Amino acid sequence: MKVKSYIIFSYLCVTHFAFSQKEVNASPQLDLFKIALINQTDSYITFPTDIGNIEPLLFEANVNPSFVIRERKDSKLIAVLTPQITIRMYNENSYPVRTPSYIPQISLYYLANKKEALNYLVLFSKIAHHSNGQDGDFYNDDNTINLQSGNFATNFFELGVLKTSYSKTLKAIKTIKSSIEIHPKSWINQEMKGKYSGVRWHNSFTSFKLPLNTENNTRANFSLKAQTTLMLDNYNDLDVLDLERVNASLTFYYHPKFLEDIGLFIQFYHGMDYYNIYFERQLSIIRFGIMTEILRF
């Protein structure tokens, strides 16, 4: 009788442990490196179907690989190096690529607080360079900006905070970001001073909708990113409440099961043209494209 009781007790313990372990493994996992990836700019390529006030493009591509530096996987402090490059290929004769954006940067992320496995508070900083690789005069003879070969260059740093949380009801991982980006006057090209905003307030919200049956190493089915940027300094003699001070974007992502390494997105963007020396132009566009699929929970 004692032997049978021992066998039953052992079976119940093993079964409970197995199911408990399965429950832990099945829950979505998040760490400091994945939070850093969420904050990094997506690597993507657009389709030639942009809608709005932009020249016909064959594509716009953003190449932004992330190289992480950390002592171990559970480190509270990590660095991320990204040699970001953005290019536009125009749907014109010979399909030119004009003045690519080069934005090499290094970011630091520090885990300030971790209440639960999916509830993080992270502080981050970034220092970056943004240029177009050209050395021509900034202005044309008619005093317009030389978009073909004009020299565009600035350096900046960014300080901010990231907060993550998880909704069990919606099965969604959420992140909120707020940061200040500063371009010191001595770090900006002389011709750009007074025309290019040097103090910017960024805010963003990201949500990843996970499958109902969450398994280990899973991807989100859908995700959403809303971003705003407010230019805070005095430039171009703009009024304090001028709408040209606001950049806003809303991006929907779909991560189909039949595409292992890429996802699809549609983006609505309104605001300053972010393509280096084209910054004086205001864009209102809708675009479609594909993005790299590297983030798993």
Image (spheres, rainbow, N blue to C red):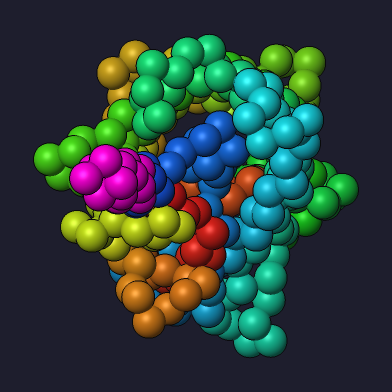
> Would you say 240 lies left or right of 139 here?
left
Q: State which region is magenta.
A: 1-19
**As displayed, is residue 203 above or below residue 168?**
above
x then y, percent, for residue 24: 36, 42
Outermost residue toward the left in this view: 169
Q: Main secondary structure of the magenta part?
A: helix
* Left or right of residue 77: residue 241: left
Q: Is residue 2 magenta?
A: yes
Q: Is residue 262 above or below residue 2?
A: below
Residue 154 lies, with reference to residue 224, above or below; the image says above
Q: Picture coordinates of residue 266 (x, y %)? A: 32, 63
Q: What residue is rendered at 53% in x and 79% in y? A: 58
- Foreground: 74 or 36? 74
Quadrant of image for the N terminus: top left
Q: How many marks?
A: 0
The residue drawn where x is 70% and y is 15% is 184
Answer above or below: position of 29 versus 209: above
Which x, y percent locates residue 14? 35, 47
Using the rendered image of the protein, determine whether residue 107 is visible from the camera's viewpoint: no
Q: Residue at x 78, y 30 (%)?
A: 71
- Where is residue 278? Give x, y as percent: 58, 49
Left or right side of 31 for 226: left
- Could one spot residue 93 in this view of the protein? yes
The question of residue 201 being in magenta is answered with no
Identify which residue, 248 or 218, lies in the foreground.
218
Q: Residue furthest front?
A: 1
Residue projecting furthest to the bottom: 93
**Residue closest to the eye, 142 or 214:** 214
Residue at x-position 43% and y-position 63%: 54
